[in-house]
Image (cartoon, rainbow, N blue to C red):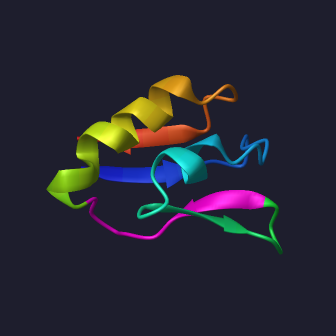
Amino acid sequence: MKARVTSQCMGDRNCNKLCPEVFKYDEDQLLSVVQFDVIPEKYEALVRQAAEECGAEAIELEE
């Protein structure tokens, strides 16, 4: 699975709190970024949850 955060990110950092191993907040861009090209399998469920819970619908997943 791959994930990316789009420019729609509101910077509320919910994904960072849910899965800090994958999502980090970029203070310069004021949005979250994904730290992996391919999401490690052990984090896939949390990344899916983050995408579902994202109020801005800014997390795109590619299975």
The correct choice, above or below, for 16 with respect to 38 in the image is: above
Extreme-front residue of the structure: 17
Extreme-bottom residue of the structure: 28
Q: Which residue is nearer to you in this view: 63 or 42?
A: 42
Q: Residue at x 72, y 44 (%)?
A: 9
Q: Which residue is nearer to you in this view: 55 or 63?
A: 55
Q: Which stretch appears magenta?
A: 31-39
Q: Residue at x 80, y 67 (%)?
A: 29
Q: Which residue is nearer to you in this view: 10 or 12?
A: 12
Write down the quadrant of residue 37 in the picture: bottom left
Write down the quadrant of residue 26 in the picture: bottom right
Q: Which residue is nearer to you in this view: 7 or 20?
A: 20
Q: Position of residue 60 (x, y in %)?
A: 47, 40
How many numbered badges does the structure rendering display?
0
Q: Residue at x 27, y 52 (%)?
A: 43
Magenta segment: does it hold 46? no
Magenta segment: does it hold 33? yes
Q: Residue at x 58, y 53 (%)?
A: 16
The correct choice, above or below, for 14 with respect to 22 in the image is: above
The correct choice, above or below, for 59 with respect to 20 in the image is: above
Look at the image and tell me in which quarter the C terminus lies.
top left
Q: Position of residue 28 (x, y in %)?
A: 83, 75
Extreme-left residue of the structure: 41
Q: Is residue 22 left or right of residue 38?
A: right
